[in-house]
Image (cartoon, helix red, strand yellow):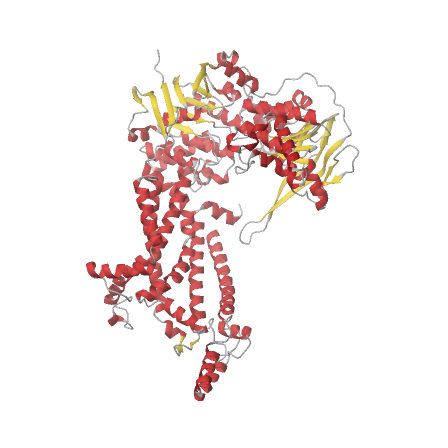
Amino acid sequence: MVTPLLDVRDLSIGFGSAPAIVRDVSFQVMPGETVALVGESGSGKTITCRSVLRILPPTARIDSGAITFTAGGQSCNLLTETRRMMRQIRGNRISMIFQEPMRSLSPLHRLGDQVAEVLRLHRDMSKAKAKARVLETFVRVGFPEPARVWKSYPFEMSGGMRQRAMIAMAMVAKPELLIADEPTTALDVTTQAQVLGLIKDLQKETGMAVILVTHDLGVVANMAEQVVVMNKGRVMERGPAPVVLGAPAHGYTRKLFAAAPAIPEVAAPARAQPGNDIILELRDVSKTYTMRAGGWSRPVGITACHEVNLSLERGKTLAVVGESGSGKTTCARIALGAELPDAGGQVLFRPSSNADVVKIHDMNSEERVCFQRQAQMVFQDPYSSLSPRMRIGQTLTEPMEIHGLGSKSERREKAAEMLRWVGLDPSMLTRYPHAFSGGQRQRLSIARALTLDPVLLVCDEPTSALDVSVQDQILCLLENIRDRMGLSYLFISHDLAVVARIADEVAVMRQGVIVEQAPPDTLFYNPRHPYTRALIAAQPEPDVNRPIDLKLVAKGAGAPGSWPEPFRFEGIAVPALTELEPGHKVRCHV
Amino acid sequence: MMFLRYAIYRFITMLITLWVVSILIFVIINLPPGDYLSNQIAELRATGQAEGVAKAEFLRTEYALDRPIWEQYLIWVGMAPGPQGWYGLIQGNFGWSFEFDRPVSEVVGDALWLTVLVNLAAVLFVYMVALPLGVIAAAKSETWVDYTAAFVGYLGLATPNFLLALMLFYYGNKYFDLPIGGLMAPEFEGQPMSWEKVKSILVHLIVPTFVIGTSGAAAMMQRLRANMLDELSKPYVETAKAKGLGPAKLLAKYPLRMAFNPFVADIGNLLPAMVSGSVLVSVVLGLQTIGPSLLTALKSQDQFLAGFVLMFVALLTLIGTMISDLLLVLLDPRIRYGARGG
């Protein structure tokens, strides 16, 4: 019997005088093994993993339990060890990677300094030797020019690069245990695939154990040997990954599975019928921003999107999918008239099938007010998009008040009706937003968007801030409302799996251009563009037998200049979007 | 190289600002009707002293006070020839003080550098007190250390400066034999600089520094504490903790560096606040700074003296802001690279 590297027993943690939020949690980590702590927000998984290093908020209180760490023939209880001992363990024997690479590195210190600090603290090494070791680690985590990274500041790098630097920092002292707290949640899906691959490789190489905290069953299936499912501070189910993922025993785990979005496997798709009742059309829309740098330097032009052509059929959903910086949000803003396209671009809107076309890019103020009633937006973050100082009733009636619709009682009536539409109780009208959960708040945002009886709804990542099970409910609700009210959606997302179920047409964007466009079935059955293929391959599936194909991801996830010959381009010298088969367009040289 | 370019750019913008400020100052000084001499002439006429009137009239033409205001401005700055030719601020002529009947440079004299000295000492005091107290208050927030620091700070903010000055003079003299009033012992006034004189000045500086600096230090301490508390909850602090860094080093290296920016940016604001805030204190303490001359000059519309003093304060402010901007560029790579356009 091998002694476990880490043995967490009956751990209970609470805050202040409130009841415990982590209750009797027990699990073990064997040397070299990966254990995934899975759960939704509020499940206590983050607090549990932080208690291992005792990095808890000052008000936290450990009620009971023991965390035994055994390495090099010595054991100690991490909960009762002296502070001095804890400092020697942190970063040295147990290290940690955090969720937000953007904020977990000090912006004022060079990366080399921040990483080498670990060696200065824990290893008796000369400066030159420490630097050599850090550069070596930089190469290992995939930086082609380690010397440049050494001198760089975090803000000069992308999110994926920063997370690599974080991993280098965690790895440089060769710890026995790595704790990764949602290490890829803030990253794009292709970057996530590469970072997960990297952690796995490093683990194989050094034989360290990993505790992976995540909410994503797909990530678990790709990484973990053991799974601990947590809910509301308790362990629901625990066991080897193939068993838990293959045949979940607990109802909660099954629920998580059902909610996890996945890219469907489709048979040959039915030919889509092109309709001609177009509600919104973007024609040759480009947007260039000029950046003014300080001092005397010349302003620089940045292309946010380039020659975008999209049309949305009435009653349907058009999804624009892309990673951060792909230009998808710019497209949405232009579609709503919040920004003007560059000269030559047109945005046309037809409120009803027999109405006149409104030119969104060239509205007078009267048309604008009218358009604002007909097109509404649902935002990404339900926590900051509702005013915390307004009662729900006020939030819901305000749009009608602004547009001078109905009497006071009629507005009230309408607000109550909208609450019923989104599955909430009208008695909630007098409450404030803080009394609602994330999912309920997103329902409220949707209700607010609906109060003016719009015909077009722009949804900007409406589910990315939500837990998977809640995401599932919100998507259902959106579908339901669309079909019952005859709405049309412009749906912006970074997640192909989310889009898969709701969209009638998907446009994949990369660096400001649409690279592939097709109905979802066609797209998933026969993706042609290497970038689309990379996106699909990078999507982690909650199935241990379908690991991420990193080669496929690497082929398409790079810059357009690194794509295979028929698709390659530099800057905005793009090949045309070619219709390979009816309804399936790919940007390639034919 | 890049820093040098920015420094030059910043220096040129400072000169331009100074020029705009000079216009504003001149206009504001001339807003009240009449000037020193026309007021004097009216008074002399009323009391029937005709011979004085002639002299005043002569001075009016001599200093071009009878010309339109824009011409007066150009002559004052030295951008147009006056009655004595090209001879204005740019050429090093600070003008004539009617009130004291002497050149402004003579009236102001030693007071100029003594002002700089007193205020620099006060600024140093502010930083030396606020930095450790603010950091400790943040690190031990919501403990008795924090509350004590806050209490002392608010006491400093709330006590009127002149009252504090009187109290310190009394007790300082009684228990520590500190001198009362002035910036040096009377026998050194007007004497060339000597070791004895420097010592005398240093001893005399103690009370004024404390009085002028206290409220600034209290405000700065609270600001630093708030900034530090913000920074302490940021994820990068957790990263540093997870590395195994000890508490003191962690505090100094990461959150303090971040909280330091507003601290440095305040240098520019601190100087003028102190110069104008210390006028009253200077009068009470009998300090030979330019504060009291500014007060008399403004009251009697002695326009060249007032204009010069205001220009001097503006220059101090602009230099302070320039220094803090340059320091920020050196301290914060984000600002440095932002200025480069990356």
Q: Position of residue B125 (x, y in %)?
A: 32, 55
Q: Nearer the viewer, residue A286 or A315?
A: A315
Q: Residue at x 41, y 32 (%)?
A: A169
Q: Is residue A574 left or right of residue B53?
A: right
- Which of the two residues, A316 or A299, is positioned nearer the viewer here? A316
Q: Quadrant of the N terminus of chain A?
A: top left
At 53% from the left and 25% from the top, the residue drawn is A467
> Where in the figure is residue A565, as x and y percent of width and height?
65, 30
Q: Position of residue A107 (x, y in %)?
A: 45, 41
- Residue at 48% across / 57% down in the picture? B10
**Does residue A319 appear left or right of residue A389 in this picture?**
right
| Rendering quarter of residue A586 | top right
Instruction: Using the image as rendered, state which of residue A237 and residue A191 is in the foreground.
Output: A237
Question: In the displayed image of the protein, which residue is found farthest to the right?
Answer: A354
A372 lies left or right of B119: right
Q: Residue furthest bottom?
A: B51
- In the rendered image, the quadrant that contains the C terminus of chain A is top right
Which of the two residues, B62 or B152, is positioned nearer the viewer here? Answer: B152
Q: Residue A367 location in percent, x, y?
A: 72, 43
Image: A173 above or below B144: above
Q: Is residue B253 above or below residue A315?
A: below
Q: Is residue B92 visible?
A: no
Which residue is found at the position 52% from the left and 64% from the top? B20
Please say whether residue B183 is visible from this viewpoint. yes
Q: Quadrant of residue A517?
A: top right
Q: Quadrant of residue B108?
A: bottom left
